[in-house]
Image: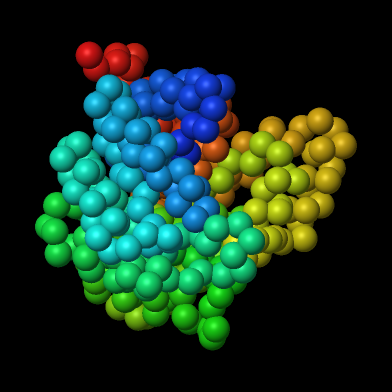
Amino acid sequence: MPAPRISFEFFPPQSLEGSFRLWETVQALAPLKPGFVSVTYGAGGTTRKLTHEAVETIHNHYGVNVAAHLTCVDASRAETMEIVEAYAKAGVTEIVALRGDPPKGAGGFTPHPDGFANSAELVAALAETGKFKIRVGAYPDPHPEAKAPGDDVRWLKRKFEAGASSAITQFFFEAETFFRFRDACEKEGIDGTRIIPGILPIEKWAGVRKFAQRCGAHIPAWVDEAFETAKRDGREELLGKAMATELCTELMEGGVQDFHFYTLNKPHLTRDICHALGVQPEGHLEKVA
């Protein structure tokens, strides 16, 4: 089985220590030659400036293709498109277009009075520029705000029709979850090869469990039980590595060729999983002058 194509997600630093962690992560993972890396926004667009700075630094100094996250939260259309133009001038050619999470305590997403109402509108505006490859989000488990079965598939179809080229899924725990979602998408006329599974290597289960509950990712009972035992034995990280490797292997056996790893700016787990899947580094990363 050939090695898969890979990509990574980073988040922008909010402290000096965070900066060191991000650049160490980039240094560790860039030699694996990812197709692209993405840099996130914080909830409510709170890291907008930091995201832009991280994107420019990685793009200019590390020779890696960077996809900048962009959301609809707390910004007018004009303000959002100013950010888009700044990315274009900086040489960025890919954007991950998302509705975005509301600010903490907001209770739910409320569009800016002069802003984009949803991610499909944002995708359409980006597509009109003709300057970017546009990636979007997808939910194999129902989004917490989905009102009816199939809503997530129908929304994804709208985003592809608006101009998206591929979708990156929220993380999930079982290969069957992805396969069911891919089948449902294909029934709606979406090319399943354009859907990239998002993989979250688990280092500490407690934090991941809370995040899974917030974003609607189904937690199988066996996962809870396995991590309870692993924590007692001091082997959470080992289990997380084994689970992610097995999940990716099952997905590859089902025809998946691309993976997007949520690194949490901690490179060692992702690097080890990639090695186990046959992805090997190509020489040493040399920082571009």
Q: Is residue 280 above or below residue 240?
A: above
Q: Position of residue 28 (x, y in %)?
A: 45, 22
In the picture, measured across the screen, residue 89 lies left or right of residue 186, that is left
Q: Position of residue 219 (x, y in %)?
A: 69, 60
Quadrant for the C terminus in the image: top left
Q: Is residue 115 above or below residue 65?
A: below
Judging depth in this view, the residue of 70 and 151 nearest the camera is 70
Marks counted in the figure total: 0
Camera sees residue 179: no
Quadrant for the N terminus in the image: top left
Using the rendered view, name the quadrant where residue 39 is placed.
top left
Camera sees residue 130: yes
Q: Is residue 160 above or below residue 236?
A: below
User: Looking at the image, which residue sits at the far front?
Assistant: 113
At x 26%, y 36%, the residue is: 65
Judging depth in this view, the residue of 133 and 187 nearest the camera is 133
At x 65%, y 53%, the residue is: 211
User: Looking at the image, which residue sits at the far bottom?
Assistant: 148
Using the rendered view, name the quadrant where residue 121 is placed.
bottom left
At x 55%, y 58%, the residue is: 103
Q: Is residue 120 above or below residue 245?
A: below
In the picture, measured across the screen, residue 145 lies left or right of residue 227, that is left
At x 36%, y 26%, the residue is: 30
User: Looking at the image, which residue sits at the far right?
Assistant: 232
Using the rendered view, name the quadrant where residue 148 is placed.
bottom right
Q: Position of residue 16 (x, y in %)?
A: 53, 22
Q: How is the image coloured?
A: rainbow
Q: Position of residue 134 (x, y in %)?
A: 26, 56
Judging depth in this view, the residue of 195 and 85 nearest the camera is 85
In the picture, measured across the screen, residue 78 lies left or right of residue 269, that is left
In the picture, measured across the screen, residue 176 lies left or right of residue 59, that is right
